[in-house]
Image (spheres, grey):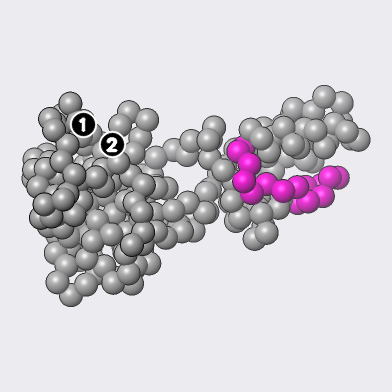
Amino acid sequence: MYKISILAFGLLLAGCASAPHREGLSTQFAPQRFSQPLPLDQSSYRIGPADLLKVTVFQVEDLSFDEIRVDASGTLNMPLIGNVQAAGLTPTELSSELEQRLGARYLRNPSVSVTVAEAASQKVTIDGAVAKPGVYEMRGRTTLMQAIAMAEGPTRIADLRKVAVFRNVSEGSMVALFDVQAIRAGDAEDPILSGDDVVVVDTSRLGARMQDILQALPALASFVFYASS
């Protein structure tokens, strides 16, 4: 059984006497619509293979690119300096590496900015009533329906009217509830996931305290904060 990294999943293992219990769990809601993924944290994100980058070398247009992709081996091919290992670095670290290489032979005091335009190697956890629960790699823009398909779809007994998405943000932990049956029928939007989201298909498998929170949600497809105090 894999290890789930999100704090909200201390409330899983529904119906089990050994399930963790968080005293004083509150539901102070701050609804947020769930139509777009969260902006990427450029300061901490580690670049991966197939990520799409924007590279700007100040006042040198020939070395600047609105879109340049990291190859499958994790390297970035740049004019003049050739291949640069990008995978595993933050955008700031890659900027410094490019500045060092360009400054060593070609430019005087170069200023380089790197941002991630599209993260192709983030992960999502799929749990609950799916054929193959686990942690899956997201390749670019990934919707809720696509994520469930990566886990080879729901089981025959899954209640697709209750699919929860858990998300950690800088302000705390959030959760939203979705009706996948309505999404399949075209009656609801198929939301875009963010890296490190956790999807639980059929929330009847969640613990009692989390069930109380989900039942109190003000609307489908709206994220709310939940807190332990």
| Res 227 label | 1
Q: Which mark is first along the chain, 2 or 1?
A: 2
Relative image position of residue 62 (x, y in whole percent): 79, 41
At a point 73% along the width and 39% down the height, the residue shown is 64
At a point 42% along the width and 48% down the height, the residue shown is 195
Q: Amino acid at mark 2?
A: Ser
Q: Amino acid at mark 1?
A: Ala
Query: Which residue in the structure is indicated by mark 2?
Result: 173
At a point 53% along the width and 48% down the height, the residue shown is 118
Q: Are marks 1 and 2 in contact (CB under 8 Å)?
A: yes
Secondary structure category for the residue under label 1: loop
Q: How many numbered circles are shown? A: 2
Mark 2 nearby-residue class (10 Å; few <14, some 14–19, many ≥20) = some
- Residue 31 visible: no
Q: Is residue 128 left or right of residue 208?
A: right
Quadrant in which the N terminus is drawn: bottom left
Secondary structure category for the residue under label 2: strand
Decide: is 116 above or below 24.
below
Outermost residue, right side? 105
At a point 36% along the width and 47% down the height, the residue shown is 5
Rendered image quadrant of residue 147? bottom left
Relative image position of residue 67 (x, y in whole percent): 64, 47
Q: Is residue 14 left or right of residue 42?
A: left
Depth check: give the residue in front, 186 or 8: 8
Q: Which residues lie in the magenta part?
A: 77-91
